[in-house]
Image (spheres, helix red, strand yellow):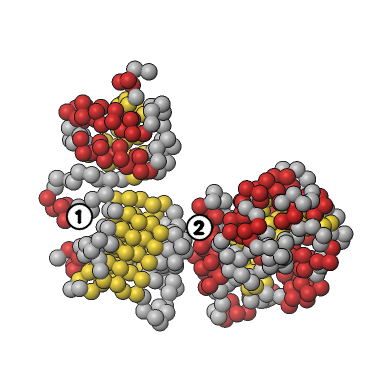
Amino acid sequence: MNHDNYVIFKGTKDGLMILLSEELDFTTLKKHFEKKVIDASRFFHGAKVALTFQGRRLSEEEQQELIEILSEKSKLDISFVYDSEDRKIEMSSVKSNTEANLEQWEEGRVGFYKGTIRSGQQIEFSGSVVIVGDVNPGGQVIAEGSIIVLGGLKGMVHAGSKGNQAVFVAALSMTPMQLRIGNIISRSPDEEQNKSSSTPIAQIAYIHQERICIEPMDGKMKNLFF
Amino acid sequence: MSEVIVITSGKGGVGKTTTTANLGTGLALEGKRVALIDADIGLRNLDVVMGLENRIVYDLVDVVEGHCRVKQALIKDKRYSGMFLLPAAQTRDKNAINPEQMQKLCDTLKEDFDYILIDCPAGIEQGFKNAIAGADRAVVVTTPEVSAVRDADRIIGLLEASELRNPKLIVNRVKGDMVKRGDMMAIEDVMEILAVDIIGVVPDDDHIVISTNRGEPVVTDLHSLAGQAYRNITKRIMGEEVPLLNLEGDQGFMQRLKKLFGLGV
């Protein structure tokens, strides 16, 4: 195989496909990859793409390394990453949106997790995370950014785990065992709430005046925005 | 096509062994060839519940360590044709075998049996890992108590991590009248947390205690509601569709009539 062919970039209708050779060990492949990215960086400049890796099984760390090289060495704005089986979709808005009014919502990398976080399971993420499913009692979600649960939040979540207080936790049904934002911890009241009889409403939790506030997501969330 | 099904729960005392004995007997009554494996090494119970304790010569550890052939250790239950028990060792502990050995054993048994049911020990340690190693499917037993449901949730997570997806749920020891009064978790509450398919609801039934002490699985008792529940689960395991038992007390004639016409109750 020609040494130029270890890494091939291909434009597809959905975005950018990167064909990786299976012959090389990962470290060598990474070098080839980096060189190729630098060569092509002028071409990529500022483009917004969805990314697919093909031709080689990548572990999550390996894939992450390649994405980091790509976003560092090129000015590429990666909006989606599909893995080789086309199933997991990771969104990482590496470069920010330029619109000024969106700047305060800059959340860095955003991860998606599909499925129920069960008792004893723990998800940790260096950015913000969206859980498409429930967080059951005994389950834990820890993120440096915000946490959104598209389901019932019944376990423990910690948003802003590195001390960031300007983050929030939102859930379709908010009955957490314990809620941590930044370095503030709160727990649900001991007396049982009159639960589930009415349809649960989505709620959002954030820090206001050094306390965790929870309020329904009804479009009047004043404190959060000011 | 033979299947290995592990019966597990996380928490102890929710009825894994009773469930294993009843489902095994139920399947045997349906004419299937069934092997029951007691994986609870050191705390064996399944032989007692089956009333076969006095016939143990060799056990699971003997088979795995090569002291005897599998066929020598299998105890034939004379009451039900086609049913065999592989008892656990009582003098050893869970570390006496490893998951690879268990898997090999399951593969061997698959050649001779339609169903292999494994009675898993409580806990999530070595014994659990051994028990699930050779399984194709998992049945999770829980009771309508928060502690049992919490442990079942943990177990389902661990099963999924071990590629045993879509485990089926049995809710055991449901007291219909207590659920009706709101003093016990309803099946819906359990299912809302665990979010897996339910394969059976077994009522709390005094017949279970009687039959367990006698060593005759309740599934053979045609007058017991729990027996009926286990017969239904047996059918569902074989792939038939059977509606869940109604445990919330007898319905009045009008209610039944309304339900019949789809008016709800």
- Residue A83, quarter of picture: top left
Which residue is outermost to the top? Answer: A2
The residue sitting at 62% across, 58% down in the picture is: B95
Helix, strand or loop at mark 1: helix
Please state the horizontal and vertical placement of residue A115, each as a whole percent of the image: 44, 54
The residue sitting at 78% across, 45% down in the picture is: B112
Please state the horizontal and vertical placement of residue B237, each as a whole percent of the image: 69, 54
Quadrant containing the C terminus of chain B is bottom right
Q: Amino acid at mark 2?
A: Gly
Quadrant containing the N terminus of chain B is top right
Residue at which label 1 appears: A105
Please state the horizontal and vertical placement of residue B108, each as a whole percent of the image: 73, 45
Depth check: B68 or B78 in front? B68
Residue at which label 2 appears: B157
Q: Amino acid at mark 1?
A: Trp
What whole-number distance in Å separates the C-alpha atoms at marks 1 and 2? 33 Å
